[in-house]
Amino acid sequence: MTRQTPTPQENPFGPARQVPLVGIARETQELQQPLIDALVQVVRSGRFVLGPVVEQLEREIAQLVGVKHAVGCASGSDALLLALMALDVGPGDEVIVPSYTFFATASAPWRLGARVVFADIEPEGYTLDVDDVARRITPRTKAIIPVHLFGQCADMVRLRQLAQEHRLHLIEDAAQAIGAAMEGAGAGSLGTAGCFSFYPTKNLGGLGDGGMITTDDAHLAQRLRLFRLHGMQPRYHHSVVGINSRLDALQAAALLVKLRRLPHWTARRQENAARYRQLFQQYGLTDWVRLPVTLRGRTHVWNQYVIRVPAEHRDALRAHLAQCGVSTEIYYPVPLHQQPCFASLAAGRLPETERAARETIALPAFAHLEPEEQQYVVQSIAQYVELHSRGKAEAAA
Ligand SMILES: Cc1ncc(COP(=O)(O)O)c(C=O)c1O
């Protein structure tokens, strides 16, 4: 194994170099004037909540995802909540979710009084292990929420078969996966409903919170529109108890500007993933680092580039990278089934989930990342590995 390991002096940017984990500042910089122009137009229009700009975004997202309807709401978390509310999920129902995900995937069914059933993940793509899901289905199961984690779809082909067989709803948590696809069909078009987040770190991020639900089902879309507006139709008449979860025109206007750049930015993320692979190979690190893969039939949009390293080194590597000025993140250090708030579920062990929580670390991979920055990230990891193996050799001598 040939390692080209730089000393700190050889690092092309010196120790003061900072590589952020996400590229929000650079994204906003690229589009600063068009964003300001779009916001000014909304200010002048006087329509700030829902309205024509939100409707335009809903049409464009529906087209991008490949569905008939899209319903804007206040966040990705609310998108999940609204989808479950509109499908009448509540007490007495069970909802199967991964534990290796962001909190909102499980808090939405929990808040509605449904029983949250955690299933394990498969180790390559970090998405639901379909065999484990199948084992956890009971007569009370009403829905499954597969999460297209890090920008890659769960195995929707097998999950759809399972859902059809047991007459279950499939609610895709596509918060991290706008533009991803499976067998050519867009994330968010593969189940009963798809839930998206426009939180600024997402591939399509707004200037604040925002979310959307996609579906082909006209009746469901109409119920989603009802539930996001306090169940009010007509004005001050309430047939169901909904919530207040609407998308702002200011967010929609900013998102429409950014949407034009999404295909290009996605391509840049995909190039970055390919470049990391080359760099890790070039530095002889592929025995030590397990690289993420694109699974069969999937289009990966790389919201996160997550590697695995030996568990005993993960936190020390992260500290070393921080010293080098490289920002990283752990998605997710404590799986949901081990969170104190879900202790009453007594979910038991989920071995692959727990292993992933110990071994994974997300590296910068955003669209505006420069090739030299990527090289610096990999060099910095090589430096850690070199220091560590030297340390081991000295200890053995
Ligand atoms: C997998 C997943 N689900 C749901 C959400 C919730 O989205 P939001 O932050 O817009 O509420 C997020 C993002 O934070 C997410 O990553």
Image: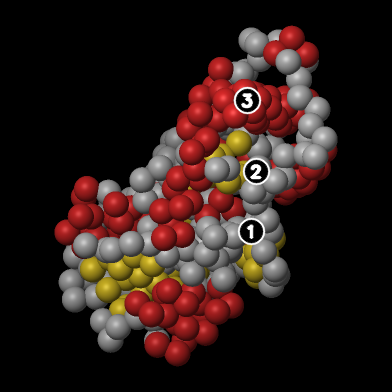
Q: Which residue is mark 1?
A: 180
Which picture quadrant has residue 383? top right
Residue 281: % across, % down: 79, 42
- The residue drawn where x is 58% and y is 59% is 125
Q: Which mark is residue 53?
A: none
- The residue drawn where x is 56% and y is 39% is 362
The residue carrying pointer 2 sits among few (fewer than 14), some (14 to 19) or many (20 or more) residues within 10 Å by Cα, namely: some
Using the numbered discs, state the Cα–Cα distance from disc 3 to disc 1 in whole angstroms. Answer: 50 Å
Which picture quadrant has residue 27? top right
Q: Is mark 2 within 8 Å of ligand 1?
A: no
SS class, disc 2? loop
SS class, disc 3? loop
The answer to whether any part of residue 383 appears in the image is yes
Residue type, numbered disc 1: Ala
Q: Which residue is mark 3?
A: 397
Residue 35: % across, % down: 61, 31
**Closer to us: 389 or 259:** 389
Which picture quadrant has residue 152? bottom right
Q: Which mark is residue 289?
A: 2
Q: Which badge, 3 or 1, comes first in the chain's sequence?
A: 1
